[in-house]
Every structure is written in structure tokens, then in C-alpha cells.
Image: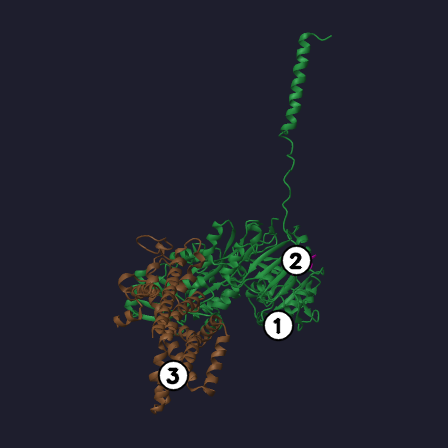
Amino acid sequence: MLTRREFVKLVALGSASLLLGCAKKETPIPTETPVETVTPTKYKAEFVLGYGRDHRLKGGKWGIGFFPKIHVLERLVEYDLKNDEYIPCLAKRWEIEKDGKIITFELNKGIKFSDGTELKADAVKFTVEWLAKNHPLGQETFESAEVVEDYTVSIKYKEEGFFNLAKMAEFHMSIMSPKSVKPEGDPKGNFVWPIGSGCFKAVDYKEEQYAIYEPNPYWFERFGLKPKFKRFVVKFIKDEDTRVMALKGGQVDAISDFIHGGSDYTPRNQLSVLEGMGFKVFKRNIPLTWIIAFNYKKDPFNDVKLRKAVDLAINRDDVIKIFDKQVLPAKTLFIEDAPGIKEAKAQGVIYEFKPDEAKRIVEENGYKGLSVDMIVDKNQSDQILVAQLIQQKLKDIGINVKLEVLETGAYRQRRDAGEYDMRLYYIGGTDRRFYLRMFWRFYPGQKWSAYVSDRTGELCKKILKEFDEKKRKQYLVEFYKAIHDEHGVVPLYFDIMTAVTAKNVVADYYHIFHYPNGIPFGEPLFYYVGVRA
Amino acid sequence: MEVVAFRMGIFRNTLCTLGLGIIVFIALMGLLAPIIAGDPYKTNMSERLKPPSLKHLFGTDQLGRDVYSRIVWGARTTLLVALTISIISMTVGCLLGAIAGYFGGIVDDVIGRIIDTFLAIPELVFNIALVGIFCVAYGTSIWNVILAVVVTNWVSYARVMRSIVLSLKEREFVICEKALGAGDWYILLRHVIPNALGPIIVLATLNMGNVIMTISSLGFLGLGVQPPTPEWGQMINAGKNYITTAPWLTFFPGLFIALSVLGFNLLGEGLQEVIGRKRLVE
């Protein structure tokens, strides 16, 4: 028999147990792992991008477009701008012989093209030989290529120098399958369709209308990722405002700049507006600087004093206001991440705004009331505004600028014929083009030159030849100083690379501007985006 | 002149008065631009995209320029270009139309087919193509726009003039002149064309609105007057990216284009009524 005390104790214990039992159902024990109740995000099968340039998937003078070169093909090496270093991609290591005249690349094993065949040395040899026969850059770069072993290829270049390695990260040097041409593997063969090892495979294309891609399963497998869409549709929308309207209207899930840089981009002054409307703006600083280029071989801009006056008259902080401060003022020749810029800046190589000094130079040298012309490409609406601002700034120091806003064709005609005094131009590009554009813009005898003098030309030659990073940096600093002293070009602002996505697009900055293994990319990548259903 | 105007009933016609009032207002605005507006080119980046206020009546644009000043100076550009186009088109069109109508035969056939050919091509598309060609061939100039619009604009004058002359040449005064031994060119220039001017003036007035629209459209497409010269169509083009954040950049140029077109259309309609009534009285 239970005593009353024992009975009360038992009832109290039972009640407590019951209460605890009930409580357990309501509140999980904190030490236990919470049960995942979030349902996985459902994505649409299709991701649609609005883009300003045709992808030329059937090939053109410069091969396929820049976009598929990045998304369908891969390169032997990639470039890390911050560390001024070439890093492995398809190649895991390389050996440089005879001052860069020969570079032997050892390839990573197990990389497959989107058709399932393995990427071996013969594909690299084929690409090099095909480029040497068919591509202007390949023709001036490569002499021959030789398969050493299954995964080792030796490339012989026409010239020696560091520039050979730098070129291997360039868009045009992307490696393609020998099956991309007909007859298969023939370096003289006709290009038919790009087959690469990159994140997407091209499946359909209609010139000036669209390009359709699908995820390359071998690439996703290599990086342990799962694609969030089945089809990647790129619609070509030439007009920048129409692209923005297409995004706002929901006809596309995202828009992106032409990854070449310098044209067909989302108007910078629209970025803040889009951000305000809830769109996600991904932007990355790239070493692309908009400049005033002079016709420096011709009167009056063959006078360094006049070039200096123009340089000092430009308020770069005002220039960036045109772009709602989405870009940075160019007080150095390139962004700070570019090699040698910080060192040059520490040595006082800075572009300043000194209107009074500019005015004095103009007056002292008899340039007051001088009339010059400036040509602008009509298709770059931002540049028309920049040109008008420059016109006013130069008027303030006594120089009259006649603006000529020309159709692209007419603009190029005038530019190539040297019929102008000033024009807006750009130097640099996305990271991979840093050295290539240095060659095109500052190396003696180039078609698309911005400025060349004996001093800057010599320094440019040294930079592109020098393998030793420290020495190269030293030449770069000297080069920046020379351009600054000679006022060869007037830097205005540093451009950016952007991608804008709709609210329902899942995307993050890291995957848009990096390869899954951490290699930084100056061009936006779309392998890890998904459109919420 | 005033008596004549009164006789024609211009000032008694509401449409005419209203239209004339608007045109005079815009013309005065353009004429007095140096007095009533500031420098339309002066940029001020610290004042950019400011909304309308007492300091800047119509706000400021992306470069901090006063939109009111640009509108006022833009009236000069728009009206001058439109007037030049109309005068050249009218002269060329009337002359060719009169020759075709008066002489008839093969001359009429040739001019008639040319008119038909031009009428078969959409006007604005043709203008765009022509401005593009002229720009490549001769560089950018306001004369490209004038020439391109004249090429398509003379046709309407020629067509109307031809049909008027066809009826006029059968009238007694022309037959009398011929009987008196007057030459064809004398009769054409001295008697036929002056008698056809009434409907042509109405057409010219109505056409001015059309020309202003064409100039503005070309400006909007970036083919007209080149920046930084203020021109209404080009101002709308420059402001279209800011339509949600700074609507005044497109609103005011749009308003003045609409006003000027309305002004010329009202005057044209009114003149048509007045001339029609006068003819009935006669």
C-alpha cells in the first residue's frame, strides 16, 4: 500500500513526466540537430540573357564571338591581375625555354570536351596550328606546335618574350576540339561548330537573333557542381536601351556587357536606376580605362604643352558623375589592382585637375581661342555626354572643341585616316587583355594605337619581353611615368564589367566573377545562376 | 495688310487665332533667347538632374545644364530648320508641280512618276537612310537633315500644285492671256502660280507641323542636330534613360514639340476654313 506522501510524490513525478513529455513534442531538444524543413528551391529550365553582340557560333574573321570563347572553350592558362601572375587552367604546369621562344605545357588529365572525348596534347597542337593558319593573332604569334607526350605539348613562337605566355590567356587562344572543323583535325579545315571543354556546349544559333547553350556535364562533374538550368538562351538585343527595357519587362532574366569591354554595355547611368527597382547589379573593376586620345603626330596636339593643358583641365570627379559614380575616376593610368600602379602612384604619377594652370599654359603658348575637333562614336551614348563635358571644360580654359558625333563606320573611317584632333578611346580591357592591349595601344607600329613615343615604345617592348616579375614591374612604373610626363593620353575613368539580374534570379558575385576553383575572371560567367520558378 | 487679314477673317477664326498665338509665342521665345534664357551649353556637375525650381524653371539635365535655356534656344534651331525645309520644299515642289500640270505630256509623265516613286517609300524611313548616307559622305551637319527632309517633302507640294494648275490652265484668264500672245513661262509664273498660292499656304502651314515632327524624330534617333546644340527631339533622346528618375528631361521638350505642331496644325485648319469660306463668298 502506498502512503499518502508516496502517492503525492508519485502523482507529482507522473505529472512532471507528462508535462516534460508534452513539452518535448512542442520544443525540440536544443542539443539535437534541427530537422531541415526548407523545401529545395525550384528553378526554371531556362535562363535567358540579353546581350548586345552576335555570338558568331559559325565563325567569323576573328573566329567565334568572345562570349562563347569564354563559356564554351577554355584556355591553357588564366591571368591573376592582382598578383600579375599566370595561373594553371587546362595546363597544370609549363616550362619556358629560349627566353620564351618555346613553352612546353603539361596538361591536366581527365578533362573532357563536351562531346565526351578527352582533351589531350593533340587538341592543343591542332588549335595552335589552326590559329596560325586562320587567325590574325595566331598568324603573328605561332610558328609550330609539337606533341611531346599524350598530355604534353610544346609550342614554338615567332618571337621570344613574356608576351607569349600572356597571350595564352587571351580569348582567341582558347582551345577547341579538332572536331570543330571539317575535315576533322585539319588545320586548314573550315570551322563548323565550337566544341570545347568549357561550362556550356553550344546547341543552336541564329545569326543576329539568338544562341542556345546547354550545360556541359563533364565540366560540371569536374568541379562537382550541379547546373540550375537546362537551357541557356542568349538573345541578341543590339540597342542598349532596348536591353534594359527587356530586363524591366521580364523578357530576359539578365543582361550583361559585351565581355570584350568598351562597347555594347548596359548604360552606366542605368545601373543605379535598376538597383533602385530591385534588380541585382554585379559589377567588377577591370583594367579598362577610357581616355582622350590625341592625334599627337599632327599639329596642334604634337605639342606636349597643349596636351598637358587638356590633361589638367579635366575634372575626373565630374566625369564619373555622368555615370552616377558607378565608375571610378582615372587618377592613374589603370585601376590600382593593375601591376605597377600602386608603385607609380607612390612616386607621384597621378593625373590632377588644375584648371588655372591649364589656362595659364594655354594663354602663355598662344593657344587661346584654338579650335579643335573631337570625334565620338554615336553608338556610345555615355561617351557623347563625356565629350560634351570635356567640350565645356576645355572652353573654360580657352579651347573650342567642335564635336562630331559619327556613325560607327564613319567614326572608324575618320579614326583610321587620322582625320581628327581628339577622340575618346579606351586602353586595357578585361584582366586577360592587360598585356595584349598594352601591345595594341602602345607598341610601335600598331593599327589601334593610342600613343607611342621613342621612350614609351621602348619601355613597352621591354615590358612585353621581361619574364622576371620584379623587373617587369619596374618597367611598368617607368612606362606609366613616361606616359604621364609626355601627356600621351588623358585618362578619364575606369570602366567596369557588369551583369544585371532580375529579382527571381539566384546568383552571387563570387560565381559570376570566378571559376569554381577560384580563378578570377574579368568577364561575367553564368554557370551558377538559376531562375526561381 | 491687317485689313486684308481681317478681310480674310483670320483673326475672326478661333482656330487661326489660337494657332497663330502659339506660333508667335514660340517664335518670340526663339527670337528673344539671348535675353530671356541663359547659356544652354554651360555645364555644372554639382547641379545635375535638379528638378524644376525657381532657379531652374524646367530643372537641369545630366550635365547640370539649364533645361529651360536649352528649350528656349532649341526653339530657334527647330523653327529655323523647319522654316528652311518648308521654304525649299515649297519652292521646288511648286515649281515642278506647276510645270507638270501646265505643260502636261511627257513632262507631266516624268514628274508624275517621280512623285509616285517618292510617295511609295515611307517618308521617315527614307529620311533616316538619307541622313545616314549624307553623314557618311559629307560628315555631320545640319544641312544633312535639311537636304534629307527636302528630298521627301517637296512631293506633297508638287502633287497639290499639279492638280491646282491642271484646273487653272483651263480657266478664262489663262486662255485670254494665251490669246493675247503671252508666253507659257510668263503665264505660269505671273498668273497661274500666284492664283494657286492659297491652298499652297494652307498646305505649307499644315506641313510645318509635319516637318517639326520629322526633325524631332530624326533628333530623337540621333540623326538630326548634333549635340551639344539644343534641339527638342535630341533632348528627349538624351533624357529617355532618366524618364523615371528625372521626367522633366523628356516632358518639357515633348511639350514644346506638341505645342508647336498643334500651333501650325490649328493655323492650317483655320486657314483652310477661312479660304474655303472666302471662295464660297466669291
Disc 2, disc 1: CB below 8 Å? no
User: What whole-number distance in Å separates the C-alpha atoms at marks 3 and 1?
Assistant: 76 Å
**Residue A422 in view:** no
Q: Looking at this view, is A431 or B278 the one in front?
A: B278
The kind of secondary structure element at disc 2 is strand
Residue of label 3: B171
Provide the residue span drawn in magenta. A106-112
What type of secondary structure mainly makes up the magenta span?
A: loop
Label annotation for residue A214? 2
At 61% from the left and 52% from the top, the residue drawn is A528
Residue A4 percent coordinates (x, y)? 68, 8
Residue A198 percent coordinates (x, y)? 64, 59
At 33% from the left and 59% from the top, the residue drawn is B68
At label 3, the amino acid type is: Arg
Which dot, 2 or 3, sits closer to the camera? 3
Instruction: Answer with left or right where residue B150 lies relative to residue A186.
Output: left
**Chain identity for the colour green used in the image:** A
The kind of secondary structure element at disc 3 is loop
At label 1, the amino acid type is: Asn
Q: Colour of chain B?
A: brown
Q: Quadrant of residue A19?
A: top right
Provide the chain ID for the residue under circle 1: A
Residue of label 1: A134
At label 2, the amino acid type is: Glu
Disc 2, disc 3: CB below 8 Å? no
Residue B71 part of the magenta-drawn span: no
Q: How is the image coloured?
A: by chain
Residue ranking furthest to the bottom: B181
The kind of secondary structure element at disc 1 is helix
Q: Looking at this view, is B220 or B10 the one in front?
A: B10
